[in-house]
Image: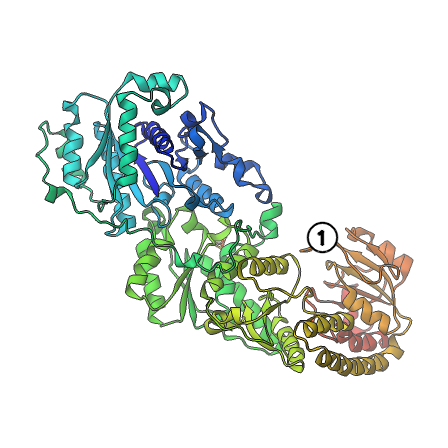
Amino acid sequence: MKIAIYGKGGIGKSTISANLSAALAKAGKKVLQIGCDPKHDSTRLLLGGKRIMTALDYMKNTPVGLQRLDRVLHVGYKGIVCAEAGGPEPGVGCAGRGILSTFALFERLGLDMNTFDVVVYDVLGDVVCGGFAVPLRQGFADTVYVVTSEEFMSIYAANNILKGVKNFDQGGHRLAGLILNSRGTHENRHPVKRFAQNVKLPVKQTVPRSELFRKAEMMEKTVVEAFPDSTEARAFHDLARDVLENHTFYPARFLNEDVLEQLILQDSPPQAQTDAENRVPSKAPGINEKSPEKKFKVKSSDKKSVFLSKSLLTREPLHGCAFSGALATTTQIKDTVTVAHGPRSCTNIACQAILSAGFRLFTRKKILLENQIAPAVISSDMDESVVIYGGKDNLVKTLEQAMEQNPKAVFLVTTCPSGVIGDDPVAAIHEIRQKYPQIPVIAVTSDGNLRGDYMQGVLNACMEGAGALMDKTVTPKSHCVNILAEKNIAFNAESNFNTIADILKEMNIDINCRFVRNTSVEQLKGFLKAPLNLPAYTDYFGRLMADFIDERLGIPTAKQPFPVGFSESVAWVREIADFFHESMAGERVIDTHRRHYETMIKTYGHTLKGRRLMILTYMHNVDWIVEAAFDLGMEVIKVCILNFSQDNLFITRYPERFEVETNYDPAKRDKDLERLKPDLLLGNYTPKNLPYPLHVDIIPMCPDVGFYGGLAFAHRWATLIKAPVTEGWKNDAL
Ligand code: SF4
């Protein structure tokens, strides 16, 4: 059971929440109380007066990778678990955004609200903006109590809160009633009763004005703890009983401001309420529905891991934004439409990146992928009015446009602006599902770079987006594999895939599903058929994907990535052949390719034999090219590793055969060239201002895979080295 206690700031809702939690705990319930008020004193009386580190302060001071749930949860009176969201000083920043970030933190660190009997959210309700409305969203509070006093501004705030609840509930029922925190005499209570009567809510409990609250506060305790036999404590035990036993919920109704003013400021007692008037109850809270996009966990695990991109983990500057990464991934799934919730410019930027990857693929490899040339994306074209008033209606309309194309699924990807204002995509999805129940709509957590970088967006789109389509009832198949972690913006992703598919075919192994590139809803549905995953890369991203699939879906991933060069290909073929008990087929494949490889070595070896090679690169594994050079009889004199890469360590199978310098300072290059006098300099970019004429060649960051990945350059080098070094265009580099 999850209860949100809403009320105007300073009205006493924190005292009420803490006393209610104390009464619930005394009744033997396991309680979690989360303070969602920037003044962060909701749980103080449950913790003997201790002010705890707020979630926002913790986030500000702790790198993402080091964050731990137990640092923001504290155990208080009778085992009540307490947390405070915190927020900025009055007049600066955005407190609502703080609440959004806090809930995102709890979700990321795996706080499972379902392990508590009761969760109490103490929420500031002066402004029901997107942030403060988080507890009203689906999956959070299933019961709402509104605290008010007899004062006009307090009732005004209560009315606003009802408006907020109505926006989220769309006719649902989860209001339990009002709690009157009385500031005055019995007669003063008339306005609250009139208000309750008009919004058709019961006043569930009246907390009397009493000195005991001040006394208990001085003892840094709740009244329930300090004065357990008092009338005041009994009021909270009654309220706790109501919370536990009440099954009657009401829809939210609110009054327009003129009516409210007249009603509150008139000086007459309320009309007696009739049952028929006041009760439009529902037996079901109507909001317990679990978000379908979170259902795809197959393998049970007590503690779910958190999957973060490297930039987020190490607090590096963010590379790109999560929106862009998510969009580049969901658009790889055929027959689907992606709705980009945000300004048109965000969609434009993200689509430009997809298009340029598509054109590069076409011009370099003559491969045309429809989803990279014409990605199926619709922008909700968020403008300023949406930022001010919220974007749900706008989003519902855009989702409708997507539905009219009759896709097999629709993805919803959000930008920074929608994240900042706290738009709730789930509410829009809920509405559209009523109209189009047959088409799945899947929200991908992205919120531009509020949620992370490009890679985080790719991860989220794979896990939450594509993952949600997987069918857990499929029958497993032998001799097929899934492909993981291809790089969608690499120009050779498709040709590399084809090379791998050809080698697998030689061993009678099919590709089941590509996760997630140039794939379809049908293939994603059948993902769980395959007994093995093959990672395209085992860099940070590749390892993360493998861990995720192993933990959540229980499918193992091969150790080796797509191989580059002969030795890697041999080891890779053997690993896969062993897994499928196809060792003989594997050896046959290796023999065929060995013969061809040796022929190529003979063809180019006589020109390249004895030539000296120096490599200046950002890559931390260059064995694919070093191996080819050695097989061609060349000498590798030095490998210089520049400082940035996805991984941190340089690895080689030939540690004794050449000089290596990691974290290489490019300023040393000319001295090294003068000293070592290589015949050929290889790098990832065209070198500028060389000290003397020298043959140079570019090696790609993402090399072509397969047995001939390293040898692919042999023909070029052989031609290059035969030509005079100062000839034609080669002078350009000088
Ligand atoms: S960083 Fe934010 S504003 Fe910029 S493109 Fe990404 S989503 Fe849009």
Q: Is residue 724 visible?
A: no
Q: Position of residue 293 (x, y in %)?
A: 42, 58
Q: Nearer the viewer, residue 433 or 667?
A: 433
Which quadrant of the figure has residue 6?
top left
Q: Amino acid at mark 1?
A: Asn
| Position of residue 109 in the picture relative to residue 123 (left or right) | right
Residue that badge 1 annotates: 648
| Position of residue 18 in the picture relative to residue 669 (left or right) | left
Label 1 CA crowd tier, 10 Å (few <14, some 14–19, many 20+): few
Q: Position of residue 610 (x, y in %)?
A: 91, 71
Looking at the image, residue 16 lies above or below residue 405: above
The color scheme shown is: rainbow
Q: Is residue 363 visible?
A: yes
Looking at the image, residue 234 lies above or below residue 164: above
Q: Position of residue 97 (x, y in %)?
A: 42, 42
Residue at screen point 41% across, 32% down: 38
Quadrant location of the N terminus? Answer: top left
Mark 1 lies on a secondary structure that is loop
Q: Nearer the viewer, residue 620 or 229?
A: 229
Quadrant location of the C terminus? Answer: bottom right
Q: Nearer the viewer, residue 19 or 327?
A: 19
| Position of residue 660 in the picture relative to residue 321 (left or right) | right
Q: How many marks?
A: 1
